[in-house]
Amino acid sequence: MFEARHTMDAPTAMSADNDTSGGASGSSWFASRHQPDADTSPGAPTATEQGSPAQATAPPGTESDLEKATPTEEKPALPTPWSTPAQVPTVPARVPSAYPLVPVHRSFPHQDILQPPSPDAVRIRRTMAEIAPVAGKVTSYFYALLFVRHPHLRPLFPAAMEAQRDRLLRALLTAAEHIDNAPVLVEYLQSLGRGHRKYGTRAEHYPAVGECLIGALSKYASASWDTETEAAWVRAYTRISQVMIDAAATDELRAPAWWYAQVVSHDLRTPDVAVVTVRPDQPYPFLAGQYTSLETPWWPRIWRHYSFASAPRSDGLLSFHVRAVPAGWVSNALVRRARPGDIIRLGPPTGSMTVDHTTDSGLLCLGGGTGIAPIKALVEDLAEHGARRSVEVFYGARTDNDLYDIDTMLRLQQSHPWLSVRAVVDQRARLQLPDAVRAYGPWHEYDAYLSGPPGMIRSGVDTLRSLGIPSERIRHDSVEELVQ
């Protein structure tokens, strides 16, 4: 029911076809637990797998290790109510904005160290510190409780649980840890609440999750667990769930829970990278630099995140750069199976890596691998706004072959004198991408944008900070800022 992800929201297991969330008002969604834990004696129901310690997910356009869960066999295409192209209506030639989109620029800092944590925050963090060494067990027990006590929720989850086993619990803990940081917490939860509409999450599902969260935490944090700690978690979860429910109810009034989209072109750039272009069945407003979640008909209820590879277009088409990763279910389906005419589903757009057009600061953009997709979109967005701001793009790749979109970037450079594109190839460069940035500059008056693998983003942020770019001017969508 909760997502944890690259911009703070990755797909979770909770999913359904077209249910929408309600806007229930709420005080406490569950009472303090006064019932025994689920039976753990021999023969009792247990989780289907043993979880592993939670880990941050990868950025849009990639799949993390958790997403690389290898199925025992390739499942055949599963028929769904939306599997035929004929069911996708034609999109108007120009797609208007269905509702206003306001870019949000936030660096998602940690709780201000000058403010002492609240008593609830102290208790919650003490719990989290205790369960950290056994996070996998906590996750497995959480799902065991959820499916044993609330079996009607099991069909909402993918048949195979490997890829998202840690995400729901991790997102809950992430949100609870930042219970004192209202600006970060509310924005994070509102995004999650809107995104969870595509899974069919409803207001009445939240009490069950809260109940099982308390059950799992109380079992594995026994040393620090007491009445006051349980009350702190109840208050935290009540706040968390209500923000998400309210955001979903508001979003329901202005946008669908998901969109159908028909594949109109499939361009295989390398054996492992494809540019997939789709036509949504109705207006799909988004901002350059954002990303969306995507589900294929071959793996129902499994969603992955991909950045938009262009600024909004007058024809309404959307493009994604997809790299097939080993055992990546969705990425391999998109690269190796998808063909024009196929139908996929899209979640709502999200992400804060957008351009502030009210300033004239230069842009320093670092894109690694398929992370060049949102960087390209940002450049197109600036061009459409008639900007003459200096834009410096560093395009990183392991090999020359991985520079699959370099021709496009060079054509943009030829058309726009304010744009400079530099390729940094690991195999023949003396410096890695972040270090290569040091050879140019100065950058202290630039806004920085990073997109690519988590390791590149981490090292890139460190490099940019050391070069004098303040944190609030470094933009990327990554959950790691919250959970590092």
Image (cartoon, helix red, strand yellow):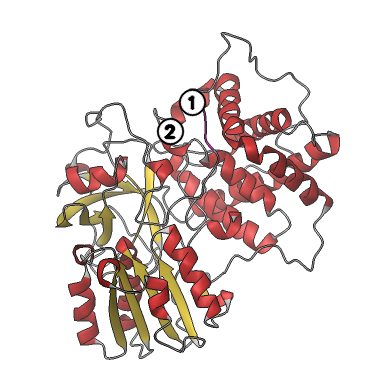
Question: Foreground residue, 222 or 92?
Answer: 222
- Badge 2: few (under 14), some or many (20 or more) residues near its Cα, within 10 Å? many
Residue 154 visible, this orientation? yes
Compute the Cα span from label 2 to label 1: 8 Å
Please name the residue that numbered disc 2 is placed on: 162
| Name of the residue lying farthest toward the top | 43
Q: Quadrant of the C terminus?
A: bottom right
Determine whether, in the image, residue 179 is placed left or right of residue 53. right
Q: Is residue 209 above or below residue 311?
A: above
Q: Position of residue 469 (x, y in %)?
A: 54, 81
Determine whether, in the image, residue 84 is placed left or right of residue 182. left
Kind of residue at disc 2: Glu
Kind of residue at disc 1: Glu
Q: Counting residues from the N terminus, which is met first, the one under dot 2 or under dot 1?
A: 1
Question: Foreground residue, 101 or 32?
Answer: 32
Q: Is residue 479 above or below residue 131?
A: below
Please name the residue that numbered disc 1 is placed on: 49
Residue 101 visible, this orientation? no
Q: Position of residue 437 (x, y in %)?
A: 40, 79
**Magenta stretch: dominant SS?**
loop
Helix, strand or loop under label 2 = helix
Helix, strand or loop under label 1 = loop
Residue 385 occupies which quadrant of the picture?
Answer: bottom left
Question: Foreground residue, 404 or 376?
Answer: 404
Q: Position of residue 139 (x, y in %)?
A: 57, 33
Q: Position of residue 173 (x, y in %)?
A: 64, 45
**Residue at x 35%, y 91% (from the top left corner):** 388
Pointers 2 and 1 in contact (C-beta within 8 Å): yes
**Residue at x 21%, y 52% (from the top left corner):** 272
Q: Is residue 340 above or below residue 404?
A: above
- Badge 1: few (under 14), some or many (20 or more) residues near its Cα, within 10 Å? some
Q: What is the span of residues highlighted in magenta in the rendered image?
A: 48-52
